[in-house]
Amino acid sequence: MLGIAQRFNVTSTGRAHGPTMVFVHGFGCDQSMWRSVAPAFEATHRVVLFDLAGCGQSDSVAYCASRHSSLDGYAEDLLEICRELDLRDVVLVGHSVSAMIAVLAAAAEPSRFGKLVLVCPSPRYIDDGDYVGGFTAPDIDEILDALEANWLGWAASMAPVIAGNPDRPELGAELTAAFCRMDPEIARRFARVTFLADNRQDLAHVAVSALVLQCADDAIAPQAVGEYVHRHIPDSELVLMSATGHCPQVSAPAETIAAIEAFV
Amino acid sequence: MSRADAESAEDLYENAPCGYLTTDPAGRILRVNQTFVRWTALDRRDFADGATRLQDLLTAGGRFFYETQCAPMLRLQGMVREIALDLVCADGHRLPVLMNAALHASADGAGGLVRMTLFDATERRSYERELVAARDAEREARARSEELQLRLRAMNDELERLAHIDHLTGVANRRALHSQLHSLVARSRRHGTALGVALLDIDHFKRTNDTYGHEAGDAVLGNVAARLRDCVRLEDTVGRWGGEEFLIIAPDTTENGLAALCERARRVVCATPVRYASQSIRVTASLGWSVWPDESVEALIRRADDALYDAKSRGRDRVVAAQPAAA
């Protein structure tokens, strides 16, 4: 039986005995999404990162179609990691779909978590009556098509990419594992789980204080959705960022770090 | 190079057989070439001053993929390759493209430029779709074939099972009993293990049929079979040997054990009457039993049958042991 650390490619940096921050990446990526943000907390916190099942370099045994047919399965994985590392009073930072995974984990074991940071969250992507999720059902089909069209291409380019990092030239050319390398079947399943999820009811069960980071002009998690999340989590704060798009931890790391720092 | 061949860099850029695009890291389009303008059938002025973002020209799927994959990857890795997107043109027509893009960071670290090349991938996209469809069809066909194999095997098993069951009573039929006997005899010959058989015949069965009707007779047969099956051990076999005749095969049994088993069977048959259509039918049975060794399966059965005949002549409703086998 593979250890948890290997199963989910868990990395732990920062202060061995500090307050803990756990970062959870969103759909179609891996923990490297936090590359520009997580290190900022290493001086003050124990920083834990991992790859979701089926993503990045998590082991293939970690993914199970039935367990991961709902976000609860992913939340269970997260809780397992926390148990194994005996993490307490965790500041849990979740991006995109993993913001909901964080919500579910916190609702299941509230004693383990001190605070939540929800980056571009959405409890439901598909519109429903008065609820604006931002997508229609045909949109979702289109998205799944777009993913298909790209992921059959990824199979060929799954070889490691030698990339110079333009932001950090001191790193030189490094052999990075192909970013967002995902088994096409897993990608399809995860996308479906993400888009068919409805976690609106779970927001009310968040018993810790939460920070909602909302980007300007986010086509995936529009402002109305961020406001909805804020309204339905009893103890929450909403911060409207000037960063645009859906990945402020990458496109505007300084602003993201500042917002989180102010909260924790 | 002659004058006629001379071509400016600008020419090269504007009229290349691919689309060239420059955006800022947030996707705002800063520069396009003529080929791109022609493809999208938009007005060049739409691209002035970053008024249009690449995302605005994509489908919902493309927008999603761009925001969650391309944009972050460009910042983290500096480039993306062979991204499949669909451009939505001015007339609503969708143009499938393949995009390569590279981020050129600015000197001060803020912002930067993203340079993109787009290739018309209409042919390739439809070809890919056909490949995917063919692969999916093949997978489905294989899955269906496996499923059919499984069902076939299950049906064969069921057929096999039915061929060995007496349909009225649900116990083994004569063919199954023969088969069981022959293999147990072979085992006894090899390992010297004990084996016994008992023939049970329902007393006055013809009379029962005449008195109560054939349906009642069938009910009696079924009932007796069930009682026998319940009173034998797990390793024993109960089967229908003939019209109103049952055979019990008892491996690994001593003579005393078999005698006791037969007496138990006799008692269980007559213990309570068989109820059928508010009738109460008294049933008794005669039994004859024999043990291996003998010359053959047939000889073994014949001895049990002789003993059964004995039981009938002595008054029925009793158990009689067979004469020992000829030495």
Image (cartoon, rainbow, N blue to C red):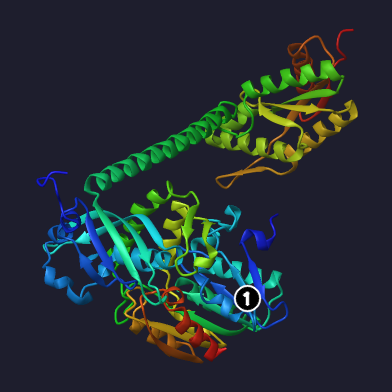
The quarter in which the N terminus of chain A is drawn is bottom right
* x then y, percent, for residue B255: 88, 26
Expressed as whole percent of the image width and height from the top left, the position of residue B139 reads 41, 40
Q: Is residue A137 above or below residue A158?
A: below
Q: B118 left or right of B10?
A: right
Q: Amino acid at mark 1?
A: Val
Decide if residue B108 is on the left or right side of residue B92: right
**x and y, in percent, of residue A7 in the image:** 63, 59
> Residue under circle 1?
A47
Q: Quadrant of residue B64?
A: bottom left
Circle 1 chain: A
Q: Quadrant of residue A248?
A: bottom left
Residue under the point 77% across and 16% down: B186
Which residue occupies the foreground of this view, A19 or B6? B6
Crowd tier of the residue under label 1, counting other residues whose Cα lies within 10 Å: few below 14, some 14–19, many 20 or above: many
Secondary structure found at label 1: strand
In this picture, is A205 found above or below B20?
below
**Badge count:** 1
Q: Is residue A49 above or below residue B137?
A: below
Work out which residue is located at the far front of the displayed protein and give it: B2
Side (left or right) of B40 relative to A217: left
